[in-house]
Amino acid sequence: MRMIALLPPLTGIRMPQLARSVSALLPLLVATACSAAPPAKSGPPDAPVAACTAKVRPGQDLQKAIDKLPQGDAPAVLCLEKGEFPLNGLVSIHRGNLVLRGKGPTTVLRMADGVQQPALVVGDYENQQPTGVIRNVSIEDMQIVASTGDKEFMPERPYLSNSAVVVRSGQGIRLAGLQVNKCRSACLLSEYDTREITIENNDVSGAIWDACRSTAPPRSPWSTTTSTTTWLQA
């Protein structure tokens, strides 16, 4: 071992002196071993988290906060703080390049009892056939409590299901880190040729269905969907 080379020659050295020499070297050896750099993390580096363009506190009007964001195609991040966000009707996300980010399950969007509307609609909700495509919208890290009314569809707009999140004619959509429950239809619904949608790391439960239906047309070869949602018992 290399440690022996650090010791003085044994010739003419008494045993007490040798013991003192070894005792003096041990702290140095231990300190050197403990100061070694940790191994580098394998894999690609984590993507940076975009800063908040604006923040919303519990009790504030979420729709007004979305509408106040800068117009145009500039990316925007709307951050929701911890707490309850009561909803009395659907929240419309009608601009692209938007991130709606909460603080995890402690950020709660809660639809009022008896309201028969979806909680969040990404895209055009005013027309049965969306008039345009909405791109690059991410909804992440929050809890959404929808409503379980009598009807599966919104009475005023019978083409809209009372889901937690409805994506209409979207591209590049991401739904991630959501805890979703109390849905009167599909909790997470994409329709009208929505493409390139990523649904990952979600817990979904408490959906009440009248029937099962498919609203998606055949996918183009380049369309991709990633789904790692955990579906719990309704």
Image (tube, rainbow, N blue to C red):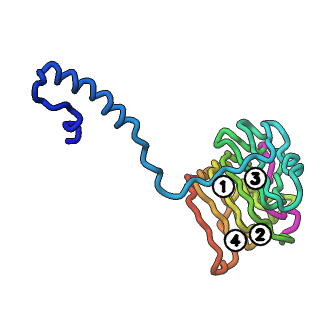
Assess whether mark 2 and mark 4 are in contact (beta carbons under 8 angstroms).
no
Q: Amino acid at mark 2?
A: Ser
- Kindly identify which residue carries mark 4: 195
- Kindly identify which residue carries mark 1: 208
Comparing marks 1 and 3, which lies closer to the viewer?
A: 1
Q: Amino acid at mark 1?
A: Ile
Q: Looking at the picture, tell me which residue is in the foreground, 82 or 53.
A: 53
Give the residues drawn in magenta, as a range: 112-128
- Kindly identify which residue carries mark 3: 150
The crowding category of the residue bearing disc 1, from other C-alpha atoms within 10 Å (few below 14, some 14 to 19, many at least 20), is: some
Q: Is residue 193 left or right of residue 18?
A: right
Q: Earlier in the sequence, mark 2 or mark 3?
A: 3
The mark found on residue 169 in the picture is 2
Q: Earlier in the sequence, mark 4 or mark 2?
A: 2
Total marks in image = 4
Q: Earlier in the sequence, mark 2 or mark 1?
A: 2
Assess whether mark 1 and mark 2 are in contact (beta carbons under 8 angstroms).
no
Where in the figure is residue 106, as x and y percent of width and height? 66, 38
Mark 2 element type: loop
Mark 1 element type: loop
Query: Which residue: 43% across, 44% down?
Result: 38
Query: Which residue: 72% across, 36% down?
Result: 83
Q: Is residue 233 left or right of residue 53?
A: left
The quarter holding residue 128 reads: bottom right
Work out whether 196 lies above or below 45: below
**Distance Cα–Cα, label 4 vs label 2:** 8 Å
